């Protein structure tokens, strides 16, 4: 028998719905669809992470509709108040050594000794990477082909993902450009030697070749 | 048995649907995609 699982995470709260019926879970999912799509984004996805995580759980629960099926509420494990000088730990379960380690990374990360061309777009440790949209805007993306090459470079050098599928690429490409990469673009890039392919578990995967990286650096880099 | 995961994130809310029923996940994904495109259009 199939199992259906729905997880809703919001701030410090996590709701988990487990059902043996797909229809029941679909009903629950539909209830979130409209409010999810119309929801105003309160924090940008690339903003620096908040350092205070002490919002009361009851307040978060009040924002979500009541569940009619089995619901498990899991408390946030990393709930703590972060202060630069004197860290205060609000939960005994939180590992103090871990907190000190986080503090060390956040405040005493060593300076980058030498930046290569590939690393110059990266943000310091513990901060979000540049978004694909910003990366496209900061380079010479004149048409969908150049956008594709820039995106392939972004995936390889900024996200450090060696190979990507067309589905993975489009999951980032579509929100950033409003367009989808199709096989004609991949074929053109392959014909020009800008991408290499390999087959893994029956799925075709792509990576930007050395020629593709040179093309980006010489022609498209902003 | 394979498990299929469909995750959506917007702001601070994150919805994750997972199931080993590929057809169900595909249907839900298509429905969400349709609604998103409708909203953008």
Image: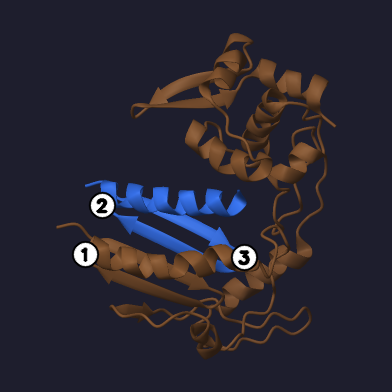
Q: Residue A204, how many percent across, how many down?
A: 43, 25
Look at mark 2 in the image and give the residue it sits on: B20
A196 and B29: which is toward the camera: B29
- Label count reads 3
Q: Which numbered disc flags the more N-terminal residue, 3 or 2?
A: 3
Direction from residue A199 to residue A122 in the image, left or right:
right
Taking depth in this image into account, of A197 and A83 the one nearest to the observer is A197
- Image colour assigned to chain B: blue
Secondary element at tag 1: loop
Furthest toward the left, the residue is: A1
Q: Tell me what residue is drawn at x 80 percent, y 32 percent.
A: A117
Other residues around mark 3 within 10 Å, as few (<14) / some (14–19) / many (≥20) = some
Colour setup of the view: by chain
The residue sitting at 77% across, 30% down in the picture is: A141
Residue beneath disc 3: B11
| Residue A120 visible from this viewpoint | no
Task: Tell me, yes or no, whether dots 1 and 2 are on the same chain.
Answer: no
> Any mark on residue A156, and which?
none
Res A115 → quadrant? top right
Where is A89 relative to A122, above or below? below
Q: Residue at x 75, y 59 (%)?
A: A109
Find chain A in the image and tell me its colour.
brown
Question: Looking at the picture, does residue A204 appear above or below residue A13?
Answer: above
Outermost residue toward the right in this view? A222
Q: Looking at the rendered structure, which numbered label has been put on residue A21?
A: 1
């Amino acid at each position: 028998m199939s199992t259906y699982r729905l997880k809703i995470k919001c701030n410090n709260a996590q709701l988990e719905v487990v059902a043996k019926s797909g229809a029941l879970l679909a009903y629950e999912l539909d209830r979130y669809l409209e409010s999810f799509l119309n929801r105003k984004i309160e924090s940008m996805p690339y903003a620096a992470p908040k350092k205070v995580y002490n919002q009361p759980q009851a307040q978060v629960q009040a924002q979500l509709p009541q569940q009619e099926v089995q619901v498990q509420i899991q408390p946030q494990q990393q709930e703590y108040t972060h202060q630069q000088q004197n860290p205060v730990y609000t939960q005994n379960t939180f590992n103090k050594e871990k907190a000190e380690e986080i503090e060390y990374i956040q405040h005493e990360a060593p300076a980058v000794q030498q930046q290569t061309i590939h690393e110059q777009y990266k943000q310091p440790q513990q901060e979000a990477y540049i978004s694909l949209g910003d990366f496209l805007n900061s380079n010479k993306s004149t048409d969908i082909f150049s956008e594709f090459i820039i995106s392939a470079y972004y995936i390889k050098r900024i996200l450090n993902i060696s190979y990507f599928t067309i589905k993975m690429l489009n999951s980032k490409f579509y929100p950033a450009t409003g367009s989808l990469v199709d096989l004609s673009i991949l074929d053109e890039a392959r014909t020009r030697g800008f991408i290499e392919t390999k087959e893994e578990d029956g799925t075709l995967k792509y990576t930007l070749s050395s020629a593709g990286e040179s093309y980006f650096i010489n022609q498209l880099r902003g | 048995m394979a498990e299929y995961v469909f995750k959506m994130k917007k702001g601070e809310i994150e919805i994750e649907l997972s199931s080993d029923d590929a057809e169900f996940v595909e249907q839900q994904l298509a429905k969400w995609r349709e609604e998103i495109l409708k909203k953008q259009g």
